[in-house]
């Protein structure tokens, strides 16, 4: 225990030093923030909001894969739960504040995440992936049959409502800043979690679970908390997405969606904070471009090919490769 | 009409039969997954797509080459299995030394490519493959009507499952295979060509999936998406049974098919999900799976 805590302290200390020394990272975050504030005046806000929702979804997924080493193949279930609950509540109770609707959707995903997490962490590695996939498929069939989801049709025309009775979210720009605020808050939370002592234990589990157990950590409890956190954030992404598109449909719950979020994370960089952002931006952008081109029908084939290429020769993802390049350059400079 | 628990006996037996047929497919597919997992330690996510390729190869072979059912039953598994060996040589071999999750992701990408390509070429709606003449018709058993083709599928699947079990558990080649599963380096040191064995094993697993596809072609609509949903159910079956034992995979597959069939009779709303529910119960009571060795 003591050893790991020392390591933690050292890790935290070097991280602290690093953040003071590498102000470029701070500058990068600030630049991205400003870019996020200005973006809706340059690009179509709904498109940007879609990217933000999926970036949040991928970041939530990455929290589990990148920082605990658990590959969930069922994150669509949480996205869809958040989307459906929020959509149902806002459609049924038109006066309801969108904030409450989103909170309810997130809470639903948290509850589901607790149940699924408790089951899934009983198996490891490849079995974990299969269990989460099967559980998510079970939820898919539930959503097909449950009356409140309207089955194949999905929920349509979900009202966006007004924020605190002041801001009309029907305005795309107003909604954009609301979605942006949600995203930034979630991103800061994830960053905080990853750099916290709790996050260090998660990384220890990722690197060597038996060792973490022998050091006295209840790794199952840590894994479960991480799973629930990830599920809740995925639900938040789904809930926000419902507000943006004013619909919730079965596509959110299908295994394709679980695969897509894996691709976004893999392409951007597993285990990096900015990777999921880059990955989701690229995948959404690519889908958008392809949909308008003659290759529109080949989206799934192209995504599959990117998957194969990523696994074969690009496993650190774009952000991961950039980091490696920067580190190499630093080493060279020091020599 | 004879009734049992308020259900006509004919309906009950009919659904049991359908359940057994589905179970035979679960058994064939989970057997292929288990064989591949044993030596390569990866979960072949392309298994559903390879099953679908088997069905499509039979369909296209009949349409364009005049290939009859019996020839397809032999040739298609060989061709698709050979395609599997190419995939293993060109792609899977490169990531052998990595975390096995990468194998899952790579084969998932392949599944998307296969499925997406065929959707573009043939659309999502299914085509039907005629039942071969020798196997059309059926038997009247008194308590139910048994279509000959369904009986044939059951027998063929069981024979193939048994043959694979025999190959792995009772032959010299199977002994090498099992030894390779335990310790590939040592087996290689004894002068056995492990990389070749890995290729052949993957080919065998893929061929099993394609064989199941040909068997399924006359029963279910042949469509590009026929494999993916089935595969997820097979994953649940594999989690229930564990992949440690060949016989376990076969038995679990059949049993899950029967349970699904019975659920269709007594509580049809849950028929889609019952196998997942069984999986949840197994995870709670016996997390390693019914026949599993892994903790």
Image (tube, helix red, strand yellow):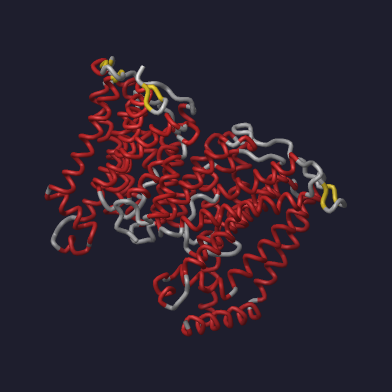
Q: Which residue is painted at 71% across and 49% down in the image?
A: A49
Report the side of B168 relative to A121 (left or right). Answer: left
Q: Residue furthest left?
A: B172
Residue at 52% in and 37% down: A298
Question: Between A263 and B291, which is closer to the camera in this rendering?
Answer: B291
Compared with B284, B185 (above or below) is below
Residue A320 in sight: no
Above or below A305: residue A212? below
Dividing the picture into quadrants, the one containing residue A143 is top right
Residue A5: percent from left, percent from top: 51, 82
Q: Is residue A22 visible in the rendered structure shown here?
A: yes
Instruction: Pinpoint residue B280: horizontal percent, then vertical percent.
Output: 44, 49
* B40 relative to B212, above or below: below
Q: How many marks?
A: 0
Image coords of residue A189 (percent x, y): 66, 66
The quarter of the image holding the C terminus of chain B is: bottom left
Most extreme residue toward the right, as rendered? A166
**In the drawing, does residue B179 fall left or right of residue A91?**
left
Q: Nearer the viewer, residue A26 or A152?
A: A152
Please determine whether, in this image, residue B95 is positioned above or below residue B246.
below
The image shows residue A25 at horizontal and vertical percentages of 65, 71
In the drawing, does residue B77 fall left or right of residue B91? left
Residue located 37% across and 57% down the image: B100
Q: Quadrant where the N terminus of chain B lies?
A: top left
Residue situated in front as seen by the camera: A1 or A8: A1
């Amino acid at each position: 225990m003591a050893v790991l805590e020392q390591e933690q302290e050292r890790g935290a200390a070097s991280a602290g030093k690093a953040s003071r020394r590498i102000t470029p990272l701070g500058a990068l975050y600030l630049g991205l923030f400003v870019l996020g504030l200005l973006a809706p005046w340059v690009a179509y806000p709904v498109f940007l909001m879609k990217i933000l929702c999926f970036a949040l979804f991928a970041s939530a997924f990455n929290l589990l894969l990148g920082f605990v080493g658990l590959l969930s193949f069922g994150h669509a279930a949480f996205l869809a739960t958040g989307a459906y609950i929020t959509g149902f509540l806002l459609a049924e109770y038109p006066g309801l504040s969108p904030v409450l609707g989103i909170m309810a959707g997130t809470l639903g995903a948290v509850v589901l995440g607790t149940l699924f997490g408790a089951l899934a962490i009983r198996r490891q590695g490849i079995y974990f992936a299969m269990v989460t996939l099967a559980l998510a498929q079970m939820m898919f069939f539930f959503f097909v049959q449950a009356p409140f989801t309207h089955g194949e049709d999905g929920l349509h025309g979900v009202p966006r409502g007004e924020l605190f009775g002041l801001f009309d979210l029907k305005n795309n720009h107003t909604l954009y800043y609301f979605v942006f605020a949600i995203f930034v808050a979630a991103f800061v939370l994830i960053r905080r979690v990853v750099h916290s002592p709790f996050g260090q234990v998660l990384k220890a589990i990722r690197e060597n679970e038996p060792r973490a157990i022998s050091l006295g950590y209840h790794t199952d409890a840590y894994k479960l908390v991480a799973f629930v956190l990830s599920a809740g954030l995925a639900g938040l992404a789904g809930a926000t997405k419902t507000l943006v598109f004013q619909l919730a449909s079965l596509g959110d719950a299908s295994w394709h969606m679980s695969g897509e979020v894996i691709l976004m994370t893999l392409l951007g960089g597993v285990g990096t904070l900015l990777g999921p952002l880059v990955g989701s931006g690229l995948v959404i952008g690519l889908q958008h471009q392809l949909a308008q081109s003659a290759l529109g029908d080949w989206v799934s084939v192209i995504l599959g090919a990117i998957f194969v290429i990523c696994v074969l020769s690009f496993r650190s993802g774009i952000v991961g490769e950039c980091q490696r390049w920067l580190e190499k350059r630093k080493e060279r400079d020091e020599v | 009409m004879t009734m049992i628990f308020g259900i006509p006996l004919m309906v009950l037996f009919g659904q049991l039969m359908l359940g057994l047929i589905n179970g035979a497919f679960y058994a064939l597919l989970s057997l292929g997954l288990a064989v591949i997992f044993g030596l390569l330690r990866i979960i072949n996510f392309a298994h559903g797509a390879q099953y679908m390729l088997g069905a499509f190869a039979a369909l296209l072979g009949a349409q364009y080459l005049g290939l009859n059912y019996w020839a397809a039953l032999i040739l298609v598994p060989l061709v698709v299995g050979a395609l599997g060996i190419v995939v293993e040589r060109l792609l899977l071999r490169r990531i052998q030394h990595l975390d096995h999750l990468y194998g899952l992701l790579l084969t998932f990408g392949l599944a998307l490519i296969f499925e997406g390509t065929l959707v573009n070429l043939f659309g999502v709606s299914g085509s039907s493959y005629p039942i071969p003449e020798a196997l059309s018709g059926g038997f009247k058993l008194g308590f139910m009507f048994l279509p000959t083709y369904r009986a044939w599928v059951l027998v063929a699947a069981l024979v193939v499952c048994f043959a694979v079990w025999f190959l792995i558990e009772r032959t010299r080649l199977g002994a090498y295979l099992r030894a390779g599963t335990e310790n590939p380096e040592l087996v290689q040191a004894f002068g056995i060509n492990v990389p070749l064995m890995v290729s052949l094993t993957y080919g065998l697993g893929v061929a099993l999936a394609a064989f199941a596809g040909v068997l399924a072609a006359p029963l279910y609509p042949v469509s590009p998406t026929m494999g993916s949903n089935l595969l997820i159910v097979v994953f649940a079956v594999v989690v229930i049974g564990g992949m440690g034992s060949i016989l376990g995979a076969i038995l679990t597959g059949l049993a899950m098919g029967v349970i699904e069939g019975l659920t269709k009779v007594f509580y049809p709303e849950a028929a889609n999900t019952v196998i997942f529910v069984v999986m949840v119960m197994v995870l709670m009571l016996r997390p390693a799976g019914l026949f599993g060795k892994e903790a």
